[in-house]
Image (spheres, helix red, strand yellow):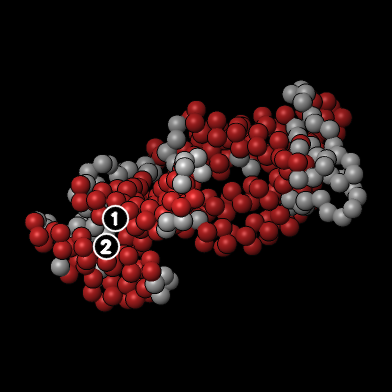
């Protein structure tokens, strides 16, 4: 027990670092997490939300446990010298013969560290055995490469041993984790996944925000690609300098906004690309003809103002929603 206790105590600082980074990572990943859960389940489930944020903590811990502490100073391991790679898959036999049972905690923890990864892949992500084991293999390979290359070249020398045995143990751990998830599924089946017909006509404010965030990412990508292509075009045509002075970013941005938030939902039953992903439509009730046109015009005006007066407009919209339980354009 003393040997195991000393081994665990050696990683206490790594664990505290992971816990310290957890709130920051959780905050940064909130919108992607919510988007994924809305897409997968069609709604937010308390257990799924908690499980996902715990998965974030685990992934942080995995990185901190395997890559921290980093080299520091002007000399020392990773700075002026490194450690060689260990590429012999049978080296564990020699280690055991030489060091005895003292090698067991290291082997056990290399397996145990990756059990949650296989469990997350099987239970949370609903991946099959092959994909879950492959995820464990790829994650372990990335870690070993980072260790063996001085964090991909950031440090001149390897500061930890890239060990092929660790790759084997980690992959085994992922396989065990998936098996545990499968056994739990027999006793406590996971909730049903959403299907294509699970589209809500009464989305809450959070789901609307997530959809708008996804749409904004898409619009930003379109604007960047389109303006870059226009710039390259103007550089290679006669009179391009004069054309380049036009406010193309504004023109492309407005056109993209009208396409994503106006044309596409009009043609797809009220679902923008982001809305489709989180399984919602902006049309809270059936509208036809002029009434539908007025609704979309009002919606474009409200969303456009939210861009122009960001971030001040969003608290006002949130307050309006929580009082009226709908957005201003839903009144029409």
Q: Identify which residue is drawn at 64% across, 43% down.
A: 113
From this viewpoint, is residue 41 visible?
Answer: no
**Measured along the vertical axis of the image, is residue 268 above or below residue 175?**
below
Q: In this orientation, which residue lies closer to the viewer: 254 or 21?
A: 254
- Marks counted in the figure total 2
SS category of the residue bearing label 2: helix
Quarter of the C terminus within the rendering: bottom left
Q: Identify which residue is drawn at 69% across, 48% down.
A: 65
**Measured along the vertical axis of the image, is residue 111 above or below residue 303?**
above
SS category of the residue bearing label 1: helix
Q: Identify which residue is drawn at 32% across, 53% down.
A: 255
Query: In the shown orientation, is residue 112 left or right of residue 249?
Result: right
- Residue 239: x %, y % from top left: 46, 46
From this viewpoint, is residue 212 visible?
Answer: yes
Residue 261 position by quadrant: bottom left
Residue 248 position by quadrant: bottom left
Query: In the shown orientation, is residue 204 left or right of residue 234?
Result: left
**Which residue is identified by label 1?**
258
**Which residue is identified by label 2?**
300
Q: Residues within 10 Å of mark 1 (few under 14, many from 20)?
A: some
* Residue projecting furthest to the left: 289
- Residue 250: x %, y % from top left: 40, 59
Asked if the residue at tag 1 contacts the one at tag 2, i.e. Cβ–Cβ closer than 8 Å, the answer is yes
Q: In this orientation, which residue lies closer to the viewer: 204 or 50?
A: 204
Q: Identify which residue is drawn at 53% across, 50% down.
A: 55
Q: Residues within 10 Å of mark 2 (few under 14, many from 20)?
A: some
């Amino acid at each position: 027990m003393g040997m195991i206790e000393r081994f665990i105590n050696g990683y206490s600082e790594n664990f505290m670092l992971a816990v310290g980074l957890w709130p920051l990572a959780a905050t940064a990943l909130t919108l992607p997490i919510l988007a994924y859960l809305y897409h997968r389940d069609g709604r937010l489930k308390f257990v799924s939300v908690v499980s996902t944020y715990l998965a974030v903590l685990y992934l942080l811990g995995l990185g901190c446990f395997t890559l921290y502490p980093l080299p520091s100073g002007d000399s020392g391991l990773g700075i002026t010298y490194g450690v060689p790679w260990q590429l012999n898959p049978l080296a564990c036999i020699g280690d055991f013969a030489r060091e005895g049972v003292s090698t067991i905690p290291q082997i056990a923890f290399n397996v145990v560290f990756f059990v949650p990864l296989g469990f997350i892949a099987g239970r949370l992500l609903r991946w099959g055995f092959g994909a879950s084991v492959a995820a464990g293999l790829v994650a372990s390979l990335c870690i070993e490469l980072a260790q063996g290359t001085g964090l991909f070249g950031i440090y001149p020398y390897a500061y930890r041993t890239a060990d092929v045995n660790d790759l084997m143990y980690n992959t085994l751990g992922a396989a065990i984790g998936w098996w545990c998830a499968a056994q739990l599924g027999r006793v406590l089946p996971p909730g049903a996944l959403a299907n294509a017909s699970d589209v809500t006509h009464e989305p809450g404010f959070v789901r609307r925000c997530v959809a708008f965030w996804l749409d904004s990412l898409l619009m930003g990508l379109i604007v960047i690609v389109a303006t870059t292509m226009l710039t390259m075009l103007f550089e290679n045509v006669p009179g391009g300098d004069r054309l380049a002075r036009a406010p193309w970013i504004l023109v492309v941005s407005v056109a993209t906004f009208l396409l994503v938030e106006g044309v596409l939902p009009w043609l797809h039953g009220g679902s923008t690309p982001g809305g489709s992903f989180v399984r919602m439509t902006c049309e809270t009730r059936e509208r036809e003809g002029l009434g539908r046109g007025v609704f979309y015009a009002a919606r474009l005006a409200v969303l456009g103002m939210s861009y122009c007066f960001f971030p001040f407009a969003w608290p006002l919209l949130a307050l309006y929603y929580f009082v009226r339980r709908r957005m201003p354009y839903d009144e029409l």
